[in-house]
């Protein structure tokens, strides 16, 4: 093969690669828009009247996840199945955002931690790498950490709305979450930085609980629970 032929071949390879990346970006843009719609929908739970609307908002969010599954199904077709990590950077952020939204919906519904398998099911993708387009464990963990920040905000807004028991439950949940993350030896730098933010979320929620205790509201709740 001559030098011109070799570079012509390389140019053809680069052109195909660029086309794949452009197709991926188009689908990711649609996914990002849907993620914004779900986030906007769930943000209403922070309003004083939002707690009563949690069931209906979660139901609508789950309906929007049907659209997410459709777009993710389209994304799977845009690149060779064995080259997931070659193009991973294109959808990494939106997949973490979607994992956070799925985790937040599950928490609002049941006040429990969503599993990686449950998130994958909600998004309509795989857990096992060998099966194709999947939820990477670090993307799942990043989504859970984003949820922790959202819950610290919810704890503050709960007090404003007069719901004094919710911050106590959030505090217990976040402390368990923090204990779980302490068991992990995180090597991923972005994930490690996100985990460092969890310490501030724990502190913020502890301040809310402490304020409730000082005002005697936590004792009233305990007394009510004993009754």
Image (cartoon, rainbow, N blue to C red):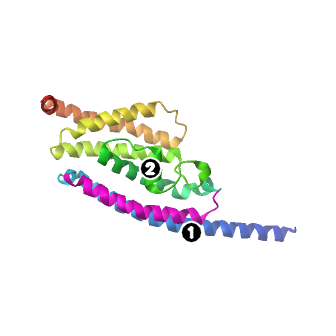
- Return the x and y of residue 142 as percentages of the image width and height: 45, 45
Foreground: 1 or 168? 168
Task: Count neighbours of disc 1 (C-alpha within 10 A) and say few if under 14, some if 14 to 19, many if 20 or more.
Answer: some
Q: Farthest residue in the right direction? A: 1
Determine whether, in the image, residue 63 is placed left or right of residue 55.
right
What residue is shown at x 15% (from left), y 33% (from top)?
A: 221
- Return the x and y of residue 201 as percentages of the image width and height: 34, 39
Foreground: 174 or 187? 174
Say if the magenta span includes residue 90: no
Say if the magenta span includes residue 73: yes
Give the magenta part as a residue range: 52-81
- Return the x and y of residue 169 as percentages of the image width and height: 26, 37
Say what secondary structure mark 2 lies in: helix
Q: Is residue 40 visible?
A: no
Displayed quadrant of residue 79: bottom right
Task: Count neighbours of disc 2 (C-alpha within 10 A) and say few if under 14, some if 14 to 19, many if 20 or more.
Answer: many
Foreground: 217 or 8? 217
Determine whether, in the image, residue 44 is placed left or right of residue 36.
left
Magenta span: predominant SS is helix
The quadrant the C terminus occupies is: top left
The quadrant the N terminus occupies is: bottom right
Disc 1 designates what residue? 23
Q: Is residue 3 above or below residue 118?
A: below
Q: Earlier in the sequence, mark 1 or mark 2?
A: 1
Determine whether, in the image, residue 143 is placed left or right of residue 2.
left
Disc 2 designates what residue? 119
């Amino acid at each position: 093969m001559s030098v011109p032929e070799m570079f012509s071949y390389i140019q053809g390879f680069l052109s195909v690669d660029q086309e794949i990346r452009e197709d991926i970006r188009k689908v990711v843009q649609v996914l990002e828009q849907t993620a914004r719609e779900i986030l906007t929908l769930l943000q209403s739970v922070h309003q004083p009247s939002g707690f009563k609307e949690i069931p209906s908002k979660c139901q609508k969010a789950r309906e929007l996840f049907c659209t997410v599954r459709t777009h993710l199904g389209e994304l799977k077709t845009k690149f060779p199945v064995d080259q997931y990590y070659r193009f991973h950077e294109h959808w990494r952020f939106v997949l973490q955002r979607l994992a956070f939204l799925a985790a937040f919906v599950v928490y609002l519904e049941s006040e429990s931690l969503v599993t990686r398998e449950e998130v994958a099911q909600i998004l309509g993708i795989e857990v096992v790498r060998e099966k194709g387009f999947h939820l990477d464990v670090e993307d799942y963990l990043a989504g859970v950490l984003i949820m922790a920040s959202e819950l610290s905000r919810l704890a503050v807004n709960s007090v404003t709305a007069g719901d004094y028991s919710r911050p106590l439950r959030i505090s217990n949940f976040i402390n368990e979450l923090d204990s779980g993350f302490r068991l992990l030896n995180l090597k991923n730098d972005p994930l490690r930085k996100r985990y460092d933010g969890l310490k501030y979320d724990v502190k913020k929620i502890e301040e809310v609980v402490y304020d409730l205790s000082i005002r005697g509201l936590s004792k009233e709740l305990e007394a009510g629970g004993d009754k």
